[in-house]
Amino acid sequence: MKTSLGCAALVAAVAWLCGLPLDRAAAAEAQAEPRAGVATNAPIPLSVFVSEPSGGKDPFFPLSRRRLNPGDAGPLSTQASGAGTSLLTLKGISMNRQLKLALINNVTFAEGEKASVRVGNQSVSVKCVEIRKDSVLLTVDGGSTPVELRLRQP
């Protein structure tokens, strides 16, 4: 009996501290009148997402180039004509007595080899003409003038 009286007193004290009514009539009255500043039946706004796949940036992958128009190659248009090699990167050179290898944009080349290299969202035909100690001579897309790619110095 002593324990139940203590629990009832504790419940009453917590209710009083929280501002809860102690009797049922006051509880019903508190539920009937809304509190000031609290929205009772506010509508939940719906999210609206408008995306035009014909162009613009992908909002989830802003660095993606897949939404560009096919004719809008940007800096790759000079790459396709062989005029510039700014997007080709010489990542490494490996040499021994018999074989020289060059790593260009994650594609391995030996001297005289021709391969397709992925640059952005396009493929470029690259032919490795000569591999030197710290650079590579290559032609891009069947060009006649060799272009030199150098290793990046740290």
Image (cartoon, rainbow, N blue to C red):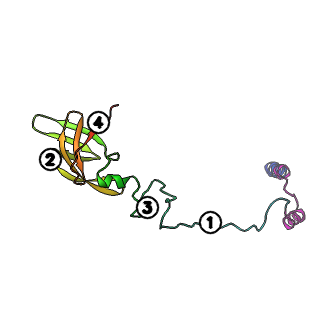
Q: Earlier in the sequence, mark 4 or mark 1?
A: 1
Q: Is residue 136 left or right of residue 49?
A: left
Circle 2 sits in a helix, a strand or a loop, which is it?
Answer: loop
Q: Amino acid at mark 1?
A: Ser
Circle 4 sits in a helix, a strand or a loop, which is it?
Answer: loop
Mark 4–mark 1 distance (CA, rounded to whole Å):
50 Å
Q: Nearer the viewer, mark 1 or mark 3?
A: 3
Mark 3 surroundings within 10 Å by alpha-carbon count, few (fewer than 14), some (14 through 19), many (20 or more): some
- Which one is in front, 24 or 145? 145
Q: Amino acid at mark 2?
A: Gly
Q: Report which residue position mark 1 lands on.
A: 47
Q: Which residues are magenta?
A: 14-34
Q: Earlier in the sequence, mark 2 or mark 4?
A: 2
Q: Earlier in the sequence, mark 2 or mark 1?
A: 1
Q: Are marks 3 and 2 in contact (CB under 8 Å)?
A: no
Q: Report which residue position mark 3 lands on.
A: 68
Q: Earlier in the sequence, mark 3 or mark 2?
A: 3
Q: Are marks 4 and 3 in contact (CB under 8 Å)?
A: no
Q: Amino acid at mark 3?
A: Leu
What secondary structure predominates along the stretch shown in magenta? helix
Mark 4 surroundings within 10 Å by alpha-carbon count, few (fewer than 14), some (14 through 19), many (20 or more): some
Mark 2 surroundings within 10 Å by alpha-carbon count, few (fewer than 14), some (14 through 19), many (20 or more): few
Circle 3 sits in a helix, a strand or a loop, which is it?
Answer: loop
Mark 1 surroundings within 10 Å by alpha-carbon count, few (fewer than 14), some (14 through 19), many (20 or more): few
Q: Report which residue position mark 2 lands on.
A: 112
- The percent coordinates of residue 153 (x first, y second) are 33, 32
